Image (tube, rainbow, N blue to C red):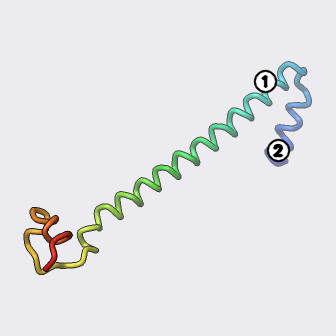
Amino acid sequence: MSIEQLINQKIQQLPSSLKQEVLNFVEFLETKQVSKYQEETIHSDEEKAWEVFLNLEKDAIGSQYSDISENHDDYLYSKE
């Protein structure tokens, strides 16, 4: 006998008030499952974002200038 059949059999023996409690519990479990999936997705997205952030320097294009962070306005806006 499968779990579904066993649950069905046991539920049929319950009075209506307890059947409503079973339904409430099943809905609670569904909500909990969806919430857990969303949390895992968010965690996964955060990990991907950190991976991109931590690899920015590695993926950056090299430059002949050593003081770009100090004189960035000169390199961006001055006319050479």
Q: Label 1, on which residue?
A: 21
SS class of the residue under badge 2? helix
In percent of width and height, residue 4 lies at 82, 44
- Identified at 69% across, 40% down, the residue is 30
- Identified at 46% across, 56% down, the residue is 45
Q: Is residue 38 left or right of residue 6?
A: left
Q: On screen, 18 above or below 56?
A: above
Q: Label 2, on which residue?
A: 4
Q: Is residue 30 left or right of residue 16?
A: left
Query: Between disc 1 and disc 2, whose residue precedes?
Result: 2
In percent of width and height, residue 48 lies at 41, 60
- Which residue type does callout 1 highlight? Glu
- Identified at 91% across, 31% down, the residue is 12
Q: On screen, 55 above or below 46?
A: below
Which residue occupies the foreground of this view, 32 or 72? 72
- Which residue type does callout 2 highlight? Glu
- Mark 1, other Cα within 10 Å: few <14 / some 14–19 / many ≥20: few
C-alpha span from label 1 to label 2: 17 Å
Q: Quadrant of residue 10?
A: top right
